Amino acid sequence: MDFIESSTPMDKGLMHFKGDGVPQNYKKAKEFFEKAASGGHVQAILYLAIIFYEGLGVEQDDSKALAYFEEAAKKGNAKAMFALGRIYITGHVVKQNYDTAREYFESSARQGEVEALLNLGMMYYEGVGVTQDYSKARVYLEQAAQKGAAEAQNNLAYMYVRAKGVEKDLEKAREYYSFSARQGNKQGEYQLALMYWNGDGGEQDRPKARGYFEKAAYQGEVEAQFFMANIYYHGQEMAVDYKRAAYFYEKAARQGHVQAQNMIGYMYSEGQGVSKDYKLAIYWYEQAANCGDVQAQYSLGYVYLAGQIIKIDLVRAFEYFQTAAENGYDLAQFNLAIMYYKGDGVPQDFLKAAFWFEKAEAQGHKKSSFILGKMYLEGQGVPHNHDKGMALIAKSEG
């Protein structure tokens, strides 16, 4: 208590702001920051800006926040300059102005503010408000990377992978991804895992790759989750483990990964690694199908056609097969052709059947080659052509 009483208004403000030694109380923090700010304390001014910008213990007020940021920036505060750069680049509170944003970032960067260096690097990398310049981007990103900015390290690695403003150098890329991964950055961990898995930029080490994939996956990196699921499902470099595969597929599926949604749907329909649950199978198939996944669209068509999971519904089966067929999926094209050929759920139409058999046959679907061959022999939906019919039947047997 004696220490608290003897502290400066700035110290007391920080203690209440952070809940350090006292209960966190933004209103009290604001009062102490105001006392410190009245004496010209620049850090207190910065914290007042943050309080009003975020609405911490007060009604959120962009105008007051902007005024405090500008006051702190005029006094040379690098973080306030960076904050103003972000405000101007996003057009929040003020009219968007890339030139002003860049100027604030440059002023902040000259004092070594890492986020300002990173943002300048990305402005030049993406050509946002400036002429795209990979060389300038690299200079700023390297400075940010040296200060430990994982995002800058990842972007530099990508530049060396894709030869953006530098010569392609996979060893250098792996080095930068390693720096990022050591900080626990999930994107760095995932990319480093891919490089170890494929042997890019150095030795191939799949056990080490698996370790990084898993670290990234547990941090929520969706592609790492999907990769881990595939490793367990297919038994790559390890025993097949459907339970672990299902765990990671569902994690990725819940983040909107379309292929993972299709796979977890399949696993629920088959009872692989999870208890059979047809409602969940259909739910996940529908999620993937609605996002354009052709395998899920086909799977739903088959579900409604077969009637093993749910009551037969030829109309819905046709709809899903047609969607997947139009998206180029050969099995859906074949099943759609069969429905037209037999008149299942739609009026029998040999012309349309032949059209879809031809689509599937062109992709190497052998059953389509055989049936289409018979159609040419019999002149069903296509002109009678004995030679073409026999050639297609022979092709189906090859």
Image (spheres, rainbow, N blue to C red):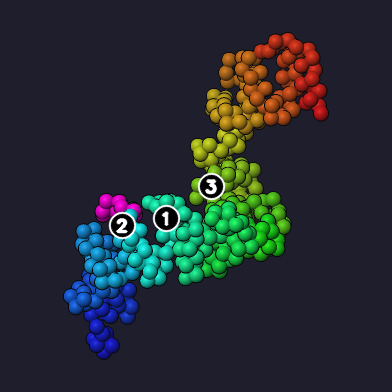
Three-letter amino acid code of the residue under disc 3: His
Q: Tell me the quarter of the image containing the C terminus.
A: top right
Image location of residue 388, percent across then percent down:
76, 16
- In this rendered view, identify the residue nearer to me: 85 or 57: 85
Image location of residue 187, percent across then percent down:
53, 59
Q: Earlier in the sequence, mark 2 or mark 1?
A: 2
Q: Earlier in the sequence, mark 1 or mark 3?
A: 1
Q: What is the distance, in whole Å, between disc 2 and disc 1 at their CAs? A: 13 Å
Query: In this figure, what is the number of numbered marks?
Result: 3
Q: Answer yes or no: is residue 196 visible.
A: no
Three-letter amino acid code of the residue under disc 2: Thr
What span is colored magenta in the figure?
86-98
Secondary-structure class at tag 1: helix
Disc number lying in front (2 or 3): 2
Q: Earlier in the sequence, mark 2 or mark 3?
A: 2
Q: Tell me, yes or no, whether the two marked residues, 2 and 3, touch with CB atoms within 8 Å.
A: no
Q: Which mark is residue 257?
A: 3
Q: Answer yes or no: is residue 182 visible.
A: yes
Disc number lying in front (1 or 3): 1
Above or below, 328 against 163 in this view is above
Query: What residue is at 52 percent from the left and 68 percent from the top?
Result: 183
Q: Which mark is residue 347?
A: none
Q: Which mark is residue 100?
A: 2
